[in-house]
Image (cartoon, grey):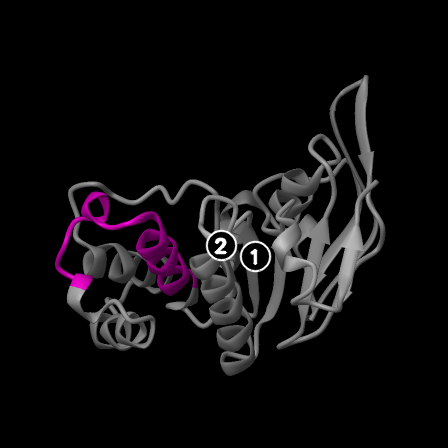
Amino acid sequence: MIYTKDLKFSFNEKTTFAFPNISNEASQTLLITGNSGKGKTTLLHLLGGLLRPKSGSISIEDTSISSLSEKELDRFRGRNIGLVLQQSHFVASLNVLENVVLASWLATGKKATEKAKSLLKQLDLEDQMYKLPSNLSVGQQQRVSIARALINEPKLLLADEPTSSLDDENAFKVADLLAKLSKEYNAALIIVTHDQRLKDKFSNQLNLN
């Protein structure tokens, strides 16, 4: 589903990351761990097409995203990659439902309102969908981010520190939800984290050191 080979990235001449090769199939979860400064978030941004590698290749199914133009990459990302980032970046003036629907409209030109409602209900957010995101708890906001990431049924789901700001109960709930939904949507799931609590939940791990 997603494969990388000889991936390297440089912020400048002094800071170069060389990443291990990755192979992660549909519905499988890969947990990427490592201390701060080891390039975890950089790697996730490369996998999501938010950064371009200095060298090496990234393939999602049969598409080499490294070779796509910016316009092609934007279109491909919207339809095939779901992102759950540390900062949710909601549109503050839109309610929860509108934020999720917006993701479908930006990717496809269509508003998947009923699908968004179904996802929010599945994530136990049925009573929150007409509230502004700022009125939700951190745990609820994280679940809205998951709904938004899944609305276009992506082939790849990327989560950057999805549990670091959550208490134990909500951290495990979010981790379980991500794993459950990636299987349900047949999406490859990659979680980047320094959260030690997740190490016992996922057997497939890659440590950046």
The answer to which of marks 1 and 2 sits earlier in the sequence is 2
Q: Nearer the viewer, residue 110 or 27?
A: 27
* Position of residue 117 measured from the top left corner of the image (x, y, whole percent): 23, 73
* Position of residue 29 measured from the top left corner of the image (x, y, whole percent): 66, 68
**Which of the 4 image quadrants contains residue 121?**
bottom left
Q: Quadrant of the N terminus?
A: bottom right
User: What label does residue 83 carry, if any?
Assistant: 2
Left or right of 133? Residue 44 is right
Q: Amino acid at mark 2?
A: Leu
Looking at the rendering, the stretch of residues picked out in magenta corresponds to 128-149
Q: Up-down: is 85 above or below 154?
A: above
Does the stretch in magenta take in 137?
yes
Q: Few, some or many C-alpha atoms within 10 Å of disc 2 (few <14, some 14-19, many ≥20)?
A: many
* Position of residue 113 measured from the top left corner of the image (x, y, whole percent): 21, 71
Q: CA distance from mark 1 to mark 2?
A: 5 Å
At a point 48% along the width and 47% down the height, the residue shown is 85
Left or right of 168? Residue 96 is left
Asked if the residue under mark 2 is in contact with the one under mark 1, i.e. CB atoms within 8 Å, the reply is yes
Q: Up-down: is 183 above or below 16?
A: below
Does the stretch in magenta take in 147?
yes
Q: Pointer 1: what residue?
A: 158
